[in-house]
């Protein structure tokens, strides 16, 4: 099998398939984010402005982390620092810079959306984008694969060794990320199905008025699963013994998974209160009752009330 083409020409302009793939992935992430925010009754027009800054931050952070991890090479070849069409974007570097930029922008543009609730909404979006981006990004790069292999599923990439089959790690990662995406949607559905349905007076709570679960559970599950995935990917298919960048990725993967477990542990008590109590008997310190006419849900990041579809929020997930 010949290496996957990484560029083509339209007249005198060289177009990189890797760049087209990234552009399509960002466009998908933008539209999916708008949809999820809108379905939950929050203003969504601000999402485009946020995404512009997130895209810039993600690319800069991902490239900076890669360059720092291979500093000796780029010190000797400074002209290659900005050659992202050759590959070399660190997932963790993109996250490290893009996440605070996204949070800062969200808090300024949509303060009525609690940050932890926003993170829950974004977790499936990120996993869907990573699954799509692996296939349309690294799979179409000059050096997109992993360790050399003689297995039948090995692929050729147009890198330094175009005649050596390597593990098609981007395809593996796309399958892993899509699986995590599906699992996060299942977690959202599971939480909706466990919402209290009977008030303290014995009356049935309409589906659209059930209280939201504690914020952070979906995010925590995503952090654990993706942290484990990144550690295993680097350890089994991508890593180089003694290479600082590879070691840092593995440590970051473990750290992300541990942070996710700590976040889930902090959600245990709010979850029990939400699941076992009548909605109108929940302690005031863990919930807000947002009965405003504008339909925007208000919470403190632990529990909030889901507005009915009439006011703009939906009980349905994605």
Image (spheres, rainbow, N blue to C red):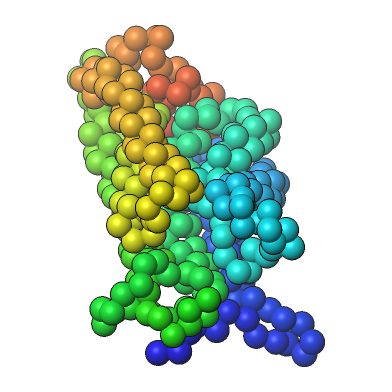
Q: Residue at x 32, y 13 (%)?
A: 282
In terms of image quadrants, where is residue 236? bottom left
Please tell me which residue lies in front, 139 or 298. Answer: 139
88 left or right, relative to 188: right
Please tell me which residue lies in front, 252 or 274. Answer: 252
Reply above or below: 286 against 83: above
Horizontal and vertical percent position of residue 95: 53, 44
- Whether residue 82 appears in this view of the structure is no
Reply above or below: 204 against 230: above
Q: Residue at x 55, y 63 (%)?
A: 25
Horizontal and vertical percent position of residue 140: 52, 74
Q: Residue at x 64, y 38 (%)?
A: 101
Reply above or below: 240 against 155: above
Q: How many marks?
A: 0
Residue at the extreme right = 12
286 left or right, relative to 191: right
Horizontal and vertical percent position of residue 230: 37, 50
- Whether residue 93 appears in this view of the structure is yes
123 left or right, relative to 179: right
In terms of image quadrants, where is residue 175? bottom left
Please tell me which residue lies in front, 265 or 234. Answer: 234
Reply above or below: 50 against 292: below
Q: Residue at x 61, y 40 (%)?
A: 97
Q: Quadrant of the N terminus?
A: bottom left
Horizontal and vertical percent position of residue 225: 31, 45
Please tell me which residue lies in front, 76 or 25. Answer: 76
């Amino acid at each position: 099998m010949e290496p996957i083409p990484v560029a083509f020409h339209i007249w005198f302009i060289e177009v990189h398939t890797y760049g087209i793939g990234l552009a399509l992935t960002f466009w998908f992430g933008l539209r999916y984010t708008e949809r999820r925010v809108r379905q939950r009754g929050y203003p969504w027009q601000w999402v485009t402005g946020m995404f512009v800054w997130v895209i810039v931050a993600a690319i800069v952070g991902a490239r900076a982390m890669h360059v720092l991890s291979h500093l000796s090479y780029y010190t000797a070849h400074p002209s290659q620092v900005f050659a992202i069409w050759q590959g070399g974007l660190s997932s963790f570097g993109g996250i490290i810079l893009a996440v605070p930029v996204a949070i800062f922008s969200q808090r300024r543009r949509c303060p009525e959306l609690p940050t932890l609730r926003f993170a829950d909404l974004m977790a499936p979006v990120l996993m869907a984008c990573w699954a799509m981006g692996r296939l349309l990004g690294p799979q179409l790069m000059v050096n997109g694969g992993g360790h050399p292999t003689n297995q039948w599923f090995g692929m050729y990439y147009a890198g330094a060794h175009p005649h050596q089959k390597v593990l098609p790690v981007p395809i593996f990662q796309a399958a892993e990320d899509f699986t995590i995406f599906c699992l996060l949607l299942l977690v959202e559905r599971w939480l909706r199905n466990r919402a209290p349905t009977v008030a303290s007076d014995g009356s049935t709570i309409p589906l659209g008025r059930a209280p939201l679960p504690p914020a952070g559970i979906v995010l925590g599950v995503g952090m654990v699963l993706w942290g484990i995935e990144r550690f295993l990917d680097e350890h089994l298919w991508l890593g180089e013994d003694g290479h600082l960048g590879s070691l840092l990725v593995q440590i970051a993967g473990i750290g992300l998974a541990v942070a996710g477990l700590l976040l889930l542990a902090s959600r245990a008590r709010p979850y029990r209160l939400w699941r076992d109590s009548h909605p109108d008997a929940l302690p005031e310190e863990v919930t807000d009752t947002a009965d405003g006419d504008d339909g925007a849900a208000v919470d403190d990041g632990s529990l909030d009330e889901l507005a009915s579809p009439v006011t703009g929020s939906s009980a349905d997930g994605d």
